[in-house]
Image: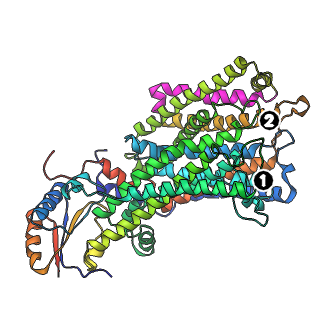
Amino acid sequence: MSQISYGNINDRVVQSMEPPGRSWLVCMVLILGALSMGVFAWSYQIRHGLEYSGINQSIAWGVYITNFVFWIGIGHAGTLISAVLYLVRAPFRNSIYRASEAMTVFAVMTAGLFPIIHLGRAWFAYWLFPYPNQRELWVNFKSPLLWDVFAVSTYMSVSIAFFILGLIPDLAAVRDESKGAKRFFYKVTSLGFRGTNHQWLHYMRGYLLFAAIATPLVFSVHSIVSWDFAMSSVPGWHSTIFAPYFVSGAIFSGCAMVLTIMIPLRKAFPGFADIIQVKHLESMGKMIVFTSLIVTYSYAVEFFIAYYSGARFERALFWFRPFGEMKGFFWLMVCCNCIIPLALFVKRIRTSLPALFVISILVNVGMWLERFNIVGTSLAHEFVPFAWSSYQFEWVEIWITIGSFGWFFMWFFIFVKIMPSIAVAEMKEKLLPPFRKKR
Amino acid sequence: MRQKFCGAWATYEYLDDTCEAIKELRRSGFEKITTHAPCPRHEIDHALGNPQSRVPFFTLAGAIIGFGMAILIIYQMSLSWILPVSGKPVVSVPIMGPIAFELSVLLAIFFTAGAILFFIVKDTLRYPVPRSRHYREYNRFMRDRFGIVVACAAPEVSEIESIMKKHQAEEVTCEK
């Protein structure tokens, strides 16, 4: 940090926003290719119906709902880092929070697509919202699915507002470093911010309130998502542990995704190496290992309660998960979420960026599988034996899933080129300000 | 309509010089002070006498309105079309929780954002800044320089200029 000064931070951020090079363009072509295949697969599904996804009569919630929960979970870490860690003044937050917030916004944008894709007839998605139709047939407020509509749309609005609010002073800094049309663009987007005491006073107070309000939202959103399952009577879903279990899982996967994004970002822009320090990424590694232990505990509790309750259907399901025909998903999940993160207890692994990167990807794979296990295996093994079934992945849902990663990374790649991916003002705030008298 | 600016503005390299200049200006009776900084600094707030923001009142108002709105929506819509669900009451209080919470948060956020904008505009109108091209195009305030702008009557400009220079201002510009 010793080489970093106020002006220096501006230079590094502006440097990262220079016109894209060949590697950026190659990545973008791959991303757009994945997205196009996803769009094609979705349009094929719209034309031919949901039979082209793996959804069947028993497993009516398949890959799409798994993807929805997965992406909402990814979005959690951004708000956690920007809001919760802001309130507790965690020192490793400053360098990574802007990219994490962007990740949140894009992840929630991706998650929001999946309930619509899952509907089949996507054009009726507006039926979910309370609006006065001809018969005044309002939505069912007793359904947790409707709570989810409110929760996810509020979370998305708050995440976007928080993200934009944080960007304003940094856009003003970029504006003052730019010329021509670029300057005009940043002049408009920075809303005339010039760092006056009046602006900072109301801005900082507002920002603190945003953080304070967003903090309970972090916990509420994934709790409400978990109630989509827990409020039903399906074995494996009807559990009071679901809300904290989902929240910790979301933080676990979100932190992993932050590492998946920040490590290449640090590599792509050498100027960021002093700003995004290894110790910051190491702290994320610590959060991953901590949340991994919570998730492991939750898995153990689920099995124990199934045994201890004596409920036959619950016991049958928790036998089916590790030993039934879908056992591969379960054991891979245990390996990725419970065993591999334990390596992060070793400082050498925690401070090795290639190791952190590989572990973060495996955690993401594990967390996707966790959601699939919850959604898929519970529905595959409900109360009536003749309705027991298995799940066959279809090419349409596989490409839609790959396309969702294309959609997410497309926005992220655009973001790093047009917006400051490091929080300029907050990084300056953490530096020792220039004093004439030695302190 | 913004007032015509009369006063002086200065740029500083060091934060302690800026704070000293602000304190002396306030001691000399100048209260229409606007400062610039590349990031929020508590030292400047202390020098200015710890001004407080009223944004939290709007946040609270937003939260209360959001909460009330949620209760009203659920109550009105539940009665407008009776939807019996497994013996639960038509207007059920526990189910109001999640939606009331989400709408409280949503409106609190919107009100906070609105309040930030409102108070910034209000203060900008109350504390005039120069309209000169030189001031508008000075582009180091968001980079690495601190600034002080003082609005005053024409005869007081020279006094402000001398205070600013006394505290090692890099550049002082008087505008009448």
Identify whether A426 is placed above or below A234. below
> Which chain is disc 1 placed on?
A
Residue stretch rendered in magenta on the structure: A325-351
Residue closest to the eye, A101 or A174: A101
Q: Quadrant of the N terminus of chain A?
A: top left
Identify whether A135 is placed above or below A180. above
Residue closest to the eye, B14 or B119: B119
**Position of A185 compared to A374: left or right?**
left
**Three-letter residue code for mark 2:** Leu
Q: CA distance from mark 2 to mark 1?
A: 18 Å
Q: Count residues near mark 1 (Cα–Cα under 10 Å), then give few for <14, some for 14-19, many for 20+.
A: some
Residue sitting at x 45%, y 27%: A348
Q: Main secondary structure of the magenta part?
A: helix
Q: Which residue is mark 2?
A: A379
Q: Which residue is mark 1?
A: A119
Q: Would you say residue B32 sits in the magenta stretch?
A: no
Identify whether A353 is placed above or below B26. above
Residue sitting at x 25%, y 52%: B42
Say what secondary structure mark 2 lies in.
helix
**Position of A301 compared to A437: left or right?**
right
Give coordinates of residue A69: x percent, y percent: 66, 43
Residue closest to the eye, A207 or A366: A207
**Position of A122 compared to A14: left or right?**
right
